[in-house]
Structures are given as structure tokens and as C-alpha cells.
Amino acid sequence: QTVVTQEPSLTVSPGGTVTLTCASSTGAVTSSYDPNWFQQKPGQAPRALIYNTNNKYSWTPARFSGSLLGDKAALTLSGVQPEDEAEYYCLLFYGGGWVFGGGTKLTVL
Amino acid sequence: QLQLQQWGAGLLKPSETLSLTCAVYGGSFSTHYWGWIRQPPGEGLEWIGDINQKGATNYNPSLKSRVAMSVDTSKNHFSLKLTSMTAADTAVYYCVKNFDLWGRGTLVTVSS
């Protein structure tokens, strides 16, 4: 069974920079896994932020960026705002099926 | 602007079948993938599967034996059926378009 692993929690100060990562139990994450990133705030549906590793939607704030970092997919927030406090999920593609990571709870403190 | 509106029974008994429908408003039903994702209370997201406008499906292997998805292009609807429901299937179920547009979610509770 494929497992996608994210940091359970991270804390960042307002204005700071933080990187969330997404690892695959099958090995190095590459662009062929089509990494996607989502933000979810309490009581809300998830909102898509990044697709195809590093592509932003029209509504994605400029401070969010996606990349590959070593053997993982990564989401970097630069100049963190208080409203960025949320749960973040990555999503990877495995040949016809998708697997979500367990999520990272980001606290802005 | 494209919108998704979903509906279906929110309370089921064990062994019953979940049936949810998602309507697509304000845009083309074609050239996209339409999917379902669920989230148990207080837990993470799980991809259930997806379907295109031609009815070609992909299902989560862990649910494949119990899942069926369908599309009705004449009504711009797509649907999810999940059989043999148990308490472990209690979750908020979301319909999605290509992961970039999400429905509001339907809380489905399985309880006797």
C-alpha cells in the first residue's frame, strides 16, 4: 500500500518562510507524480493551490510556490500571513490513481 | 462561473448503499475529470475515484469492489454509489472537478 508522508505539524512566525514536504513510500517524488497541494481551513472544503509540481491557479497567492526538493515535493510559503494558518495536503498520482498525504497542520504564531 | 452542487442522503444504516449526485452549473461538462473525495471527521482526505464525460472510471483500489461512478451528460450530473456502508465510511464526501473546484461536501453518517 502506497503511503504519502507529510510533516504532521509546523509552526512559523508571521512574515517568515516555511517549507512543507511530501514524500512517497515508493521512492523519489518526480514531476511524473503530478504533485498537487491543497489548503483546508476548519469547516471549509479544501482549496487547490498548486498543480503539476509548481503551477499556480489564478487564485493562488504569490507567496505560495511548489517545487521538488531532493526526493520530495515541496510547498514553500514566503512572507507567511496569519490567514495562512490551515491544514495543507499534498496529492500524488500513481498510474491511474491518486493518494493524499496525511496533511500538515501549519500554525502561524 | 462553474459551480458544483451535490446532494444525497446524509444518514445511512450499516449495509446500506450511499448514493450521491453532483450537478455542474455554469460551464461545460466535457473535457474534465469529475471525482469524489472523502474526509472522515477529524481526519485527512481520501481519493475515492474519478470519471470522465465518456464514463471512463478510475477507482481507489481499497474501495474498488464497492464503488460505482456514473455520468449523465444530458443533465450535467455525475454520481457516486458506495455499497455495504459501515461506520468506517462515515465522512464528508466532496465532489470535485479536476481537483481545482470542490463541492461544499455532504456529511454522511453510518449508524444503526
Image (cartoon, rainbow, N blue to C red):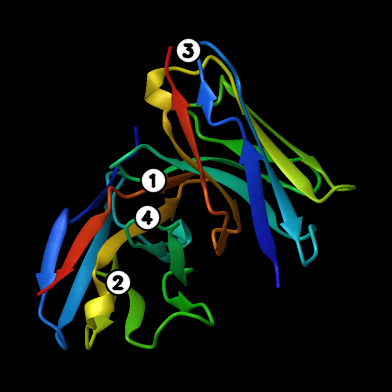
x and y percentages locating residue B15 in the rendered image: 52, 11
The residue that label 1 is drawn on is B45
Query: Disc 4 vs disc 2: which is toward the camera?
Result: 4
- Badge 4: how crowded within 10 Å, few (<14), some, or many (20+)? few
Query: Disc 1 vs disc 2: which is toward the camera?
Result: 1
Evaluate if marks 3 and 2 touch, with contact meaning CB atoms under 8 Å apart: no
The lab-note entry on whether marks 3 and 2 share a chain reads no
Please state which of residues A105 and A90 is positioned toward the viewer in this rendering.
A105
Evaluate if marks 1 and 2 touch, with contact meaning CB atoms under 8 Å apart: no
The residue that label 3 is drawn on is B14
- Badge 1: how crowded within 10 Å, few (<14), some, or many (20+)? many
* Local secondary structure at mark 2: strand
Q: Chain of mark 2?
A: A
Looking at the image, residue A78 sits to the left or right of residue A49; the answer is left
Q: Earlier in the sequence, mark 1 or mark 3?
A: 3
Looking at the image, residue B19 sits to the left or right of residue A26; the answer is right
Q: Chain of mark 3?
A: B
Q: Residue at x 90, y 47 (%)?
A: B74
The residue that label 4 is drawn on is A43
Which amino acid type corresponds to the residue marked 4 in the rendered image? Gly
x and y percentages locating residue A38 in the rendered image: 40, 63
Residue A101 seen anywhere in this rendered image of the structure: yes
Q: Chain of mark 1?
A: B
Q: Residue A75, labelled with which disc?
A: 2
